[in-house]
Image (cartoon, rainbow, N blue to C red):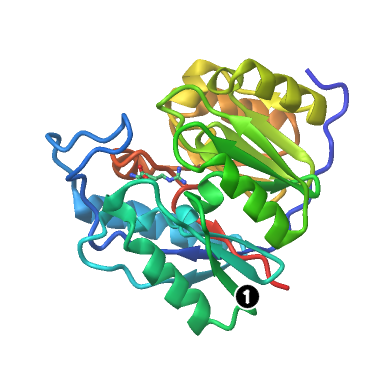
């Protein structure tokens, strides 16, 4: 228990999202995906609309990219790019099934006035593996984004990048194992990282909230915080309680249908950080 609950402050955000019009699971590139199980596109759309409306109700701006037929994973907009200081580093995907998304995201940034739009020269799954916190980027590797991509991101954005290695295939992107809650505060699931990465995280964020296996298994770490309000899956009840103890306001969202593709609220949300 904390002796004093810290005061938290919301900052209005700008997000990019993609409607799951063509959502389905017809290939498997992570352990959550099972193409033999049916998906309900109408339900995915309904849950996504609810997430979209929630951001707007909380005072955030949401921009939209048109979904492309045949790209069912495009709804996971966090993977499209990393955007910092008006610069967009567009993803280069690990698997061919998602490769064509890069073109669509690149075109969107070009059309929307970003002063620099670069296509990653190495496998780089955008904000799924690059999270800005404490003036640096925490960058995941192990399953998707390559280590060489971390260095490329550091050079482009001119900020320090700290590489973290993921070891549990269910938590294959950094944003499935770690949430940025405030400018210098995070929560994470330690078991998703190798021993070295755990020590790095302990040193950088001694005050982090540590999630347990039950929290992680319902994708509780795939959460989105504006500094005060934290959108997280309805099923992450224990984690919601912990967040409240730390001064945050948990906002439960049901994204169960999108979890069949291996994504939650954060995966559907790319933060656009203007110049
Ligand atoms: N089916 C997608 C994939 O495996 C899910 C992506 C989830 N996105 C995320 N930011 N974790 O690539």
Q: Is residue 74 rendered to the left or right of residue 15?
A: left
Q: Residue at x 32, y 63 (%)?
A: 100
In the depicted structure, whether residue 231 falls above or below residue 157? above
Residue 266 in view of the camera: yes
Q: Is residue 42 rendered to the left or right of residue 90?
A: left
**Residue 101 pos. (x, y %):** 36, 62
Ligand 1 appears in which quadrant?
top left
Label 1 neighbour load within 10 Å: few <14, some 14-19, many 20+: some
Which residue is most to the right? 4
* Quarter that holds the C terminus: bottom right
| Mark 1 element type | strand
Residue 73 in view of the camera: no
Q: Residue at x 30, y 56 (%)?
A: 46
**Residue 4 pos. (x, y %):** 87, 28
In the depicted structure, whether residue 248 falls above or below residue 42? above
* Quarter that holds the N terminus: top right
Corner quadrant of residue 20: bottom left
User: Which residue position is annotated with label 1?
Assistant: 116
Q: Is residue 39 rendered to the left or right of residue 172?
A: left
Depth check, front residue: 51 or 179 = 179
Disc 1: residue Cβ within 8 A of ligand 1's nearest atom = no
Depth check, front residue: 100 or 201 = 100
């Amino acid at each position: 228990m904390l002796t004093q609950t810290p005061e938290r402050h919301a900052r209005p955000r700008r997000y990019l999202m993609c409607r799951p019009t063509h959502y389905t699971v017809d290939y498997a590139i992570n352990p959550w995906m099972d193409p033999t199980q049916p998906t309900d596109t109408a339900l995915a759309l309904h849950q996504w609309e609810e997430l979209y409306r929630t951001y707007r109700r909380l005072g955030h701006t949401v921009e939209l990219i048109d979904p492309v037929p045949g790209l069912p994973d495009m709804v996971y907009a966090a993977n499209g790019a990393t955007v910092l200081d008006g610069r967009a580093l567009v993803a280069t995907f690990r698997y061919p099934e998602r490769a064509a998304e890069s073109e669509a995201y690149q075109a969107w940034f070009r059309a929307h006035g970003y002063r620099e739009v670069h296509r990653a020269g190495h496998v780089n799954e955008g904000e799924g593996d690059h999270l800005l916190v404490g003036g640096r980027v925490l960058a995941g590797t192990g399953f998707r984004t390559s280590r060489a991509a971390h260095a490329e991101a550091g050079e482009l954005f001119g900020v320090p990048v700290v590489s973290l290695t993921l070891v549990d295939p269910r938590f294959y992107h950094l944003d499935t194992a770690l949430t940025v809650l405030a400018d210098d505060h995070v929560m994470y699931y330690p078991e998703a990282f190798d021993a070295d990465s755990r020590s790095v995280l302990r040193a950088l964020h001694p005050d982090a909230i540590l999630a347990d296996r039950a929290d992680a298994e319902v994708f509780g770490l795939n959460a989105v915080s504006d500094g005060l309000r934290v959108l997280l899956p309805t099923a992450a009840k224990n984690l919601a309680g912990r967040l409240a103890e730390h001064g945050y306001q948990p906002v439960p969202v049901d994204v169960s249908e999108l979890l069949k593709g291996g994504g939650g609220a954060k995966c559907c949300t790319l933060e656009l950080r203007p110049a």
